[in-house]
Image (spheres, rainbow, N blue to C red):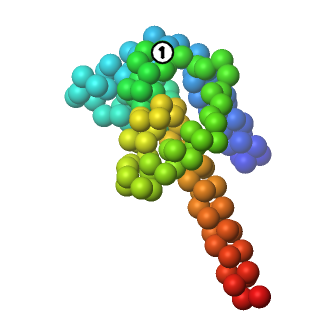
Amino acid sequence: MAEEIEGERRCMKMNRIWRDKVMLTQEKKLEAINIYMKGGRSLRSVAKQYGVHHSTIEKWLHNYQLFGAEGLKRPEQNRQYTEEEKQEAVVCFFAEAETLYNVCKKYKIRSISLLQNWIQKYEQEFINSGNADEKDQEN
C-alpha cells in the first residue's frame, strides 16, 4: 500500500512538472533568462522558480544567444541538416579544437547533444573504416 501511494505521488509530481514545462511561453522563457542574466540568482534558483530543470534554462540561454528571442519559440519542425553541414561541424570540432558550444554557435545548431551524436557517428565510421583497412592489409 505504501509503495502504491509513493508511486502515485511520483506520478503526480511528474505530471505537474510536465504540465509546467508545456505551459511556458516564449515570454516566460525570456523572463527567466533575463532574471538569470541580470545576476544575483543562480541557474538552479531561476529553474526552480519556473518549475524546470536547470539544464532546461541552459538550453534556453544557448538558443537565445544563437537566435535571439526567436530561439525560445518551439520550432514547428526540426531543422534538417545536410551531410555536408554535419561533416563541416564535426571537422571544425576536431581540426580547430573548438568546444561543443562554440561549434554549435558557429553552425547555428540548436542542440549540443545533436552535435555530440554526429561526432559519435563520425568516430564510429572512422574506427570501422580503419578496421576494414587493417583486414585488407592482412590478406
In front here: 6 or 63?
63
Which residue carries the number 1 mark? 70
Nearest the eye: 136 or 80: 136
Q: Amino acid at mark 1?
A: Glu
Residue at image point 48% right, 20% down? 71
Toward the viewer: 59 or 54? 59
| Residue 138 placement (x, y as % from top left) | 72, 88
Residue 11: quadrant of the picture: top right
Relative placement, left or right, of 121 versus 61 is: right
**Picture quadrant of residue 34:** top left
Can you give x and y, in whole percent of width and height, for residue 3 in the image?
A: 73, 48
Q: Position of residue 118 (x, y in %)?
A: 59, 49
Residue 93, above or below 19? below
The foreground one among 57 and 96 is 96
Count of marks overlaid on the render: 1
Crowding at mark 1 (Cα within 10 Å: few <14, some 14-19, many 20+): few
Q: Give coordinates of residue 18: x percent, y percent.
A: 63, 27
Say above or below: 100 vs 121.
Answer: above
Instruction: Give above or below for 74 relative to 103.
Output: above
Is residue 22 visible from the viewing direction of this image?
yes
Q: Is residue 50 left or right of residue 135?
A: left
Q: Residue furthest bottom?
A: 138
* Residue 59 in sight: no
Considering only vertical position in the picture, is 96 above or below 21? below
- Quadrant into which the C terminus falls: bottom right
Q: Residue at x 71, y 46 (%)?
A: 2
Residue at x 48% of width, y 15% of height? 70
Q: Quadrant of the N terminus?
A: top right
Residue sitting at x 68%, y 76%: 133
Assign a secondary structure to mark 1.
helix
